[in-house]
Image: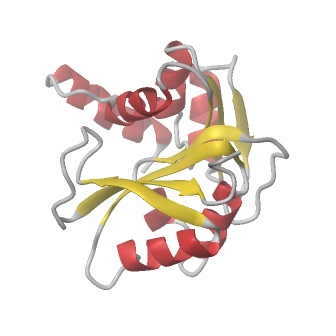
Amino acid sequence: MSGRDYDARWEQLAADGHNPHGEADFVDQLLGGSGRVLDAGCGTGRVAIELARRGYQVVGVDIDTEMIAQARAKALQLVWYQLDLSTFDLGEGFDAVVMAGNVLLFTVPGTEAAVVARCAAHLSPGGALVAGFQLRTGGYGLDQYDTDCTAAELTLKQRFSTWERAPWNGGNYAVSVHIHRHRSDS
C-alpha cells in the first residue's frame, strides 16, 4: 500500500464520522498532556502529527521510504528517521514509545524481539511501551510479545481490547502498556 493510499483510507474513515485519532487519544490520556513520544513504525505520520498538534515533542521512525517521505511532506517541522526498528539507536529517551497500526506484524519475521528490545531501550525512566496489534492464529501473539517484553525488562501494566480502552476480553486485537521494571521507580 502506498503512503497516499494509506492516508486516503484514514481520511475516508474520518469523513465517515469515525475518530482517526484513537491512538493519539490513548497516548494523550496515558501521558497527561505533555511529554516526549517516539512513534515507532510511524508510517505516514498520522499518530505523530496528531500528538505534535496536541503539544507533544514527537519523533517518528519507519523503514519504508515512501511512508517516511509522505510523513516528511506533511510535517516538515517534525523529526523523521528512516531506520530499521530492529537495530535503530537514537541515543535519547522518551516518555512513551508507541507502536500503533500493527507495527509488529509488519516487521521481518523473527525480528520482533529485537524491535521490542530497541524500543524499550529508548524509554526514559518511568516511560511506557505502548503497542496495539491484531492477534492472528499462528502469527506473532501476546504470549510471545509478553515474553519479548519480559526479556527487555518490561512489565505489563495494562491491556485493553481497543485504543478506546475497552476492557481486555481475549479478542483478536490487543493494546498493551508495558513499563520498564528497573526504570519505573527512578
x, y percent for residue 129: 54, 51
**With respect to residue 35, does 139 lie above or below?**
below
**With respect to residue 165, does 10 lie above or below?**
above
Which of the two residues, 48 or 97, is positioned nearer the viewer here? 97
Quarter-of-image position of residue 173: bottom left
x, y percent for residue 70: 57, 33
Instruction: Give the color scheme: rainbow, by chain, secondary structure or one colour.
Output: secondary structure
Identify the residue at image location x=53%, y=43%.
43
x, y percent for residue 51: 50, 24
Quarter-of-image position of residue 172: bottom left
x, y percent for residue 126: 62, 43
| Residue 141 can be seen, yes or no | no
Tell whether 163 sits left or right of 143: left
Identify the residue at image location x=23%, y=53%.
161
| Residue 122 can be seen, yes or no | yes
Quarter-of-image position of residue 114: bottom right
Q: Quadrant of the C terminus?
A: top right
Image mark count? 0
Tell whether 168 sits left or right of 92: left
- Residue found farthest to the right: 91
Which of the two residues, 33 or 63, is positioned nearer the viewer here? 33
Which of the two residues, 181 or 25, is positioned nearer the viewer here? 181
- Residue found farthest to the front: 185
Identify the residue at image location x=46%, y=72%.
146
Tell whether 69 sits left or right of 169: right
Identify the residue at image location x=73%, y=56%.
121
**With respect to residue 138, does 23 lie above or below?**
above
